[in-house]
Amino acid sequence: MKDFKIITVDQVGIGDRVSRITKRSVKKEAKIHGLKMALNMIDLTTLEGADTVNKVKQLCYKGMHLHDSYEDLPTVAAICVYPNFVGLAKEQLKGSGINVASVATAFPSGNSSLEVKITDTKMAIDAGADEVDMVISRGKFHQGEHNYVFDEIAKIKEVCGKHARLKTILETGELGSLDNVRRASDIAMHAGSDFIKTSTGKISPAATLPVTLVMLEAIKDYYYETGIQVGMKPAGGISIAKLALQYLMLVKETLGDKWLTNQWFRFGASSLANDVLMQLEKQRTGNYQSKDYFSKD
Amino acid sequence: MPKKETKLDLKSNWELAPSLESTGHVNLKKQYELFIGGKWVKPSSKKYFDTNNPANEEKLASIANANKKDVDLAVKAARKAYDTTWSKLSGKERGKYIFRIARIMQERAKELAVVETLDGGKPIRESRDIDIPLAANHFFYYAGWADKLEYAFPNRNPKSLGVAGQITPWNFPLLMAAWKIAPALACGNTVVLKPAETTSLTTLLLAEICEQAGLPDGVVNIVTGAGDTGAEIVNHEGIDKIAFTGSTGVGKIIQKAIAGTDKKVTLELGGKAANIVFEDAPLDQAVEGIINGIFFNQGHVCCAGSRLLVQESVYDIVLRKLKDRMESLIVGNPLDKNTDIGAINSKSQLDTINHYIKLGKEEGAEIYQPEGKLEKNGYWCKPTLFTGVAQSNRIVQEEIFGPVLAIQTFRTIEEAITKANNTPYGLSAGVWTDKGSKIFNMTNQLRAGIVWANTFNKFDPTSPFGGYKESGFGREGGLHGLEAYLQFED
């Protein structure tokens, strides 16, 4: 396999670039376009021990009907749940075009055997998952066992086959440095991931702009190297529209239009949609509406 | 695996809507007089010249043209202020005035930023985030030194010089005025300053701020005009020190003019800096540094990284990344918050840049400019790369002072150093590598006043700035910046 030497990342330089991009002023039509794009890229997520059948049903309905009083709104991209709710979500979303994503591989820690992870993944796929969000073994990564991490991803990719697209969660909050984020991104892409994803959303920090920029740059280099497009999913901590637009601006200026679709870019978020909707209503009516005008599912 | 076509669509369909900085809070006068002895006085020549907005060629205001008589008045006012008040004030009291100037600059920051952009063509993002805050910071920084000169130079008994004649350039009008005035005042000198004729407005607003701060009359005098006004300052007998920032050509003239006099002098002149990228550098951040190094302020920067030296093993990658990054640079209305590259400062500067672009093509270099249209009115230049150049190309040797980058490769550290130092200039340089020891090796051998490691064009009041060789001498900023305005009894 490939020797994953460190491609260095300068933290200060990443910060400078991010601050430059976040100063982009997105107004008027550009803002409306961006906000609608953001809605359409959301993986509406619920990953709680307390998840219930009804909660998943509600979430599915919300995903299809974000705010019916606003015409021509897109739907979200996917509903993201634990494997045991995949069947239910699949049924609820029938005919909507919305995908069902399932976390798997001993999410969120990934501390289990490969056999258990494969079984977990198979369970999700058998129930009809369109997308699988796996976690990498951070412990092995830090021990320098990059081949182990690579093989594990490759194996899960094999299980996914043509049934599901594979999103690989690096859990960047546990990787310790941007250099490591870059290396983990390269491993995940070379092992066959369709998407690379920042975080489980279970630890802090989750997604950040600097980490996302490092991953987007890795995707860009990989694309130039192989011609293969890999998607990006920042997840966790993105709950306001302004921040979502800043992420999209990072994508626009790093990878361009090819990635500005939910085929190649996603937000893993549970509460982002409502803030985006509120901003869209503000653009339409000129006023901010009460949060209670937007359903909380 | 067969490669698919790999091309990014960086000219996105998701276009940003115009986002113009408001100008409602700016009230420019129709006509500006000279600021001499604390009063606004008409020029004895009765002549005025226009200052224009380079982004649309519209007139902004009339500016008084100072002649020999006016300069003489200004120097006398400065001398009087020096003898009667300023040199007698304690450092602590001087510091209070300088602090006050800094605070008023912050209060009027938005106005200063807009005027700087209108008059000079630089993007509002830069004047708002860099020029104006840095200028205020310079006053804050030197205000703090005013009562601590004895500690800055222990046992050397520092004393002020007298009247400083200062001449500033058009690329960072307010910032350069701050670089010059703040340390001069902190050290107890008084000032006669001439801003560049195309960009006088923010310096005149600074004169208003001095008034607002209650600075004693005559401590700061502003005389506007072109090169001949500057010559009157340089040649005036009542001036004790000349501080000049501008072209190497004029610097040489000044040097000749003051030979044989006891005027002290500091010169901050041109540059042709090498930005050196090694294969182990963080390449994406290096590309950002290259962009910032050459396209900051339309390349109107004396320390611009106008020569890129890339290690040959990463040349293709760096060039590709650089071109990709240039796709997202926005050239246009400087008042738009999204503009990355504003207007070229003047018609004559645009002519100079275009002359060099033509020359580069004639010399056989390969040119690259991103696609896109430029505005009809105003002075504009696309960000430009030249590849396939050698040390003997004129576009590699001479300062262009525009958004034009010449790119060469190197194989070994020795070759990089030889090429970097092979220039009459020596103002700045940049080194990009992940290896600390390589950075120190380079900094020891590069003949440049400022060497940036893994960054470029970063400025701070605490850091001295100045050149080697034909880039001038003397330092501005930091502790070193004080020395230029003091004499010592040691």
Image (cartoon, coloured by chain):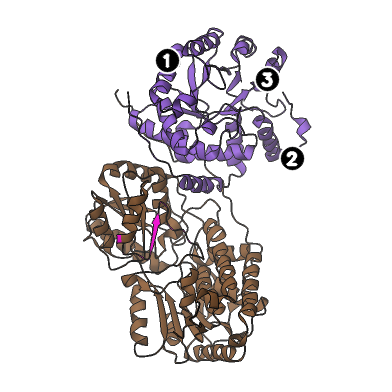
Q: Marks 2/1: CA distance?
A: 49 Å
Indicate the chain on which mark 2 is placed.
A
Left or right relative to B158: residue B428? left
Q: As shown in the figure, which amino acid type bears the numbered disc 1?
A: Lys
Relative to B274, say whether A245 is above or below.
Answer: above
Q: As shown in the figure, which amino acid type bears the numbered disc 3?
A: Leu
Would you call the spot at circle 3 few (<14 residues within 10 Å), some (14-19), or many (20 or more)?
many
Q: As shown in the figure, which amino acid type bears the numbered disc 2?
A: Tyr
For disc 2, the marked residue is A288
User: Residue at point 44% right, 16% down?
Assistant: A157
Q: Which chain is brown?
A: B
Chain A is which colour?
purple
Task: Tell me where the magenta segment starts and ends, as one range.
Answer: B445-459
Q: Position of residue B163 (x, y in %)?
A: 51, 86
For disc 1, the marked residue is A155
**Does B456 appear in magenta?**
yes
Q: Position of residue B487 (x, y in %)?
A: 47, 84
For the residues beneath circles 3 and 1, the answer to whether they share a chain is: yes
State if disc 1 and disc 3 touch (CB < 8 Å).
no
Indicate the chain on which mark 1 is placed.
A
Along the line of sight, the residue nearer the viewer: A237 or B349:
A237
Q: Position of residue A54 (x, y in %)?
A: 72, 14
Quadrant housing the C terminus of chain A = top right
Residue A59's disc number:
3
- Residue B103 shows up from this direction: yes
Q: Marks 3/1: CA distance?
A: 31 Å
- Residue B324 shows up from this direction: no
